[in-house]
Image: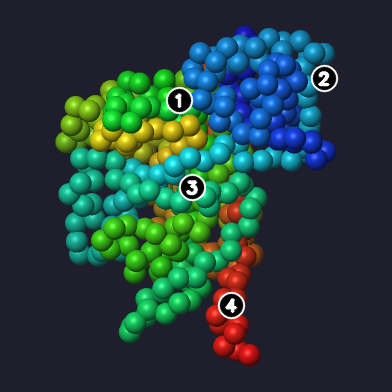
Amino acid sequence: MSPDSAARHLPYGVFSVGGGDPRVGVAVGDRVLDLSVALMDPLFARPSLNPFLAAGPAIWERTAQQVGAVLADESTAASSMHPVADVALHMPIEVADYVDFYSGLEHATNAGRILRPGQEPLKKNWRELPVAYHGRSGTVVLSGTDVVRPRGQVPTTGRPELAPTGRLDVEVEMAFVVGVPSRLGEPVPVEDFAKHVFGMLILLDWSARDIQAFEYEPLGPFLGKSFATTISPWVVPYAALVAAAADGPPQEPAPLPYLDHPQPRGYDIELELVINGQVVSRPRFVTQYWSAAQQMAHLTVNGATLRTGDLCASGTVSSFDVASQGSLLELSLNGTQPLTLADGTQRGYLEDGDEVRVSASAPAAGGGRVEFGDAVGRILPARTLKIMAKRQV
Ligand code: CA
């Protein structure tokens, strides 16, 4: 493998050393290459990847070549390297708009069967367009940030009550990150995907199932999702995923022409969901029904813009096979068939103190794996509400 093709595999992130200013780096094994020093370019002396992402594909390609040249000379590279263990990682992007798609056929079918038994699991729109909702970009957090158990209106046999969720779940997802913006009113076709979209990362879509169940009709998720969404610190460029291209599921009926995306439209990315140190499932991204390019084309077909830093989640990566399911809703059949963890305790949904970790990797050109790293979150107990504290005095 030539040095610059190896450099195309490297994920980009934002880090700081010893309390210094955050800057852009690439992960090289267990080290970080400081691009602001190695390439002497102010584009990388910034606290987010956004300026680099906005610069577009020619700069992304030139940077990969420059990184390859730096890494080819170990003595030069070493002066710009830091052990990952010695750096603080920061949010890689300033998130613009956040969208969560619902593009896993098997997940949507499983969820429909569990939540609406006796009905057709997929709504009439599902095979016609990539269903999605707009989420809350301000609560997208970096891996390692604790997740406080949210409160909300939880259904009871009578009126709902304001209570901490009793059904805290996590959805295993990937997400794409937009680099080059589009113009208002101008749809972006499937074939222009690589002109706008830079890369992918891992995303944990925390979900309060009881709050979600009561609030979502008829407009979709709101507080059941908006309290936190976790992303991994490293963004893997699509250019690194050439060897991971793979056929996705067949699409029946054939989508409308603006959504046409010939095979291979999928990516062979393997994920792993770990709760409290125990692997509970291994979701496979190649099973996703709608591709990221189709999601992007649909998102903009009405003239809505793409912005630098837009984050678009894939939808839960799941399966009919329990070994590859990407949510506790599915793994525990909505809490009715709890999982047994390594310490013998059982989980229908997440408990306070639980740690969720999702990692991902894909085949690399020339052998080996492209590593996405991981996204981690630990559950903290619900906070006491001030209004309740007042009543107690
Ligand atoms: Ca989701």
> Residue flagged by tag 1: what amino acid is it?
Val
Image position of 3 with respect to 173: above or below: above
SS under mark 3: helix
Name the amino acid type tagged 2. Answer: Ser
Q: Residue at x 61, y 46 (%)?
A: 142
Instruction: Decide which of tag 2 and tag 1 comes sooner along the chain.
Output: 2
Q: x, y percentage for residue 86?
A: 80, 37
- Label 2 lies in ligand 1 vicinity (Cβ under 8 Å): no
Label 3 to label 1: alpha-carbon separation: 18 Å
Residue behind mark 1: 180
In the rendering, which numbered label is found on residue 386? Answer: 4
In this figure, which residue is indicated by the disc labeled 2?
79
Residue wearing tag 3: 137
Residue type marked 3: Ser
N-term mark: 4 or 2: 2
- Quarter holding the N terminus is top right
Disc 2 from disc 1: Cα separation: 32 Å
Residue 340 in percent (x, y) is at 54, 64
Task: For the residues labelled 3 and 1, say whether their Cβ atoms are less than 8 Å apart.
Answer: no
CA separation in Å, label 4 and label 3: 26 Å
Q: Are marks 4 and 2 in contact (CB under 8 Å)?
A: no
Disc 3 residue crowd, few under 14, some 14–19, many 20+, Cα 10 Å: some
Asked if the residue under mark 3 is in contact with the one under mark 2, i.e. CB atoms within 8 Å, the reply is no
Label 4 or label 1, whichever comes before in sequence order: 1
Asked whether the residues under the numbered discs 2 and 1 touch, taking CB atoms below 8 Å apart as contact, a structural biologist would say: no
Dot in front, 2 or 3: 3
Looking at the image, residue 118 lies above or below residue 126: below
Residues packed near mark 4 inside 10 Å, few (<14), some (14 to 19) or many (20 plus): few
Where residue 62 sits, quadrant-wise, is top right
Nearest the eye: 13 or 249 = 13
User: How dense is the environment of label 2, judged by Cα within 10 Å: few (below 14), some, or many (20 and up)?
Assistant: few
